[in-house]
Amino acid sequence: MAVTAFAAARIRNLFAVVILSGIFSLLAAVLYVTLNAVDVAFTEAAVGAGISTLLMLATLSLTSEEEKARFNVKIIPLLIVIATGAVLIYGTFDMPAFGDPNAPAQVHVAPRYILESGKEIGVPNIVTSVLASYRGYDTFGEVVVIFTAAIGVLILLGRGHDRWRPGMRSNVISEQNEEEV
Amino acid sequence: MSRHSILRVVAKFMIPFIILFGLYVQFHGDFGPGGGFQAGVIIAAGFVLYGLIFGIENARKVVPAWATRVLLAFGVLLYGGTGVASFFLGGNFLGYNVLANDPVAGQHLGILLVEAGVGITVAATMMTLFFVFAGQDHE
């Protein structure tokens, strides 16, 4: 995964970068499977490796295949990135050891989900009962986020024939807007 | 792409199974890995494959722009509507226990409806994104 990440950061050909990010997602999915998080791995493989690679390729077909900006090192952003990374690594020292049974994540609501969800929800897959029932609000928020994303793309790019502003067509939107999407 | 006969034949053979697998993931999410998010993406992938092989114009005939837009909103409304329904039946918002006579059956029904809403919205979103990016989103 580290190799693909570094390669994706260095290569100038964006087509290769998109394919590398797809490979990265697939490797991440394999990692999730080894951690027994099958649902997450499934999503990563379908969304990360499948659909987002496809959307990136579609974006490339609208823009250009080669990276235009010259690569030059700026000192202050680099220092900020290094400092933030160091703080984050320092933060991980307080994390409980992997698989520690007394970790906060294991003693708060997880026992209730594991012991009671079979009786309360009656669904064998605990992930589904947590996602759709116990944490229903969060999932509702996620669906609204996806909905909003689609609306945003429709507003930015999907102006086929605009009845109210006939001059505005999708092809006059500047290249910069398309890159932001 | 339309003259590659191997691609056309294999895609025609694959697409029903991709969509069938998507439906399996959707409705089997209670028992194994899967659920609305994954199922929506897989079903959308079936239509996207059709669009890639047979052209966007033909894919737009199968799934017109108004259909994806209606489904986009319908999924969110189905999710929210389930919440509001449980609200009016005397429970909390998205508290599924009151949807049926006994709590476990209510939870089953609620999760089924909510996952269906998720799946519909995700599938419609992915198809919308693909068709818009492919530049053929005319009504």
Image (cartoon, rainbow, N blue to C red):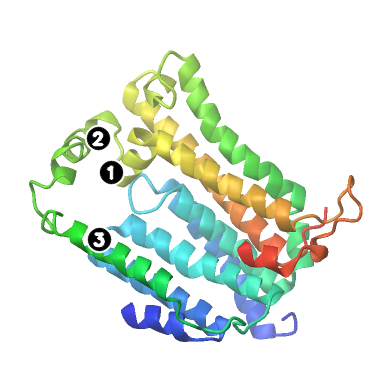
Q: Which residue is drawn at 34% across and 20% down?
A: B102
Instruction: Tell me residue B130's x, y (percent).
Output: 65, 63
The residue identified by callout 2 is A117
Instruction: Tell me residue A37's x, y (percent).
Output: 28, 58
The residue identified by callout 3 is A87
Give the camera-side residue of A99 and A46.
A99
- CA separation in Å, label 1 and label 2: 7 Å
- The quadrant of the picture occupied by the N terminus of chain A is bottom left
The residue identified by callout 1 is A126
Q: Residue at x 86, y 56 (%)?
A: A168
Same subunit, labels 3 and 1: the answer reads yes
The answer for which chain carries disc 1 is A
Badge 1 vs badge 2, beta-carbon distance below 8 Å: yes
**Identity of the amino acid at label 3?**
Val
**Identity of the amino acid at label 1?**
Ile
Which dot, 3 or 1, sits closer to the camera? Answer: 3
Which dot, 3 or 2, sits closer to the camera? Answer: 3
Badge 3 vs badge 1, beta-carbon distance below 8 Å: no
Of mark 3 and mark 2, the one earlier in the sequence is: 3
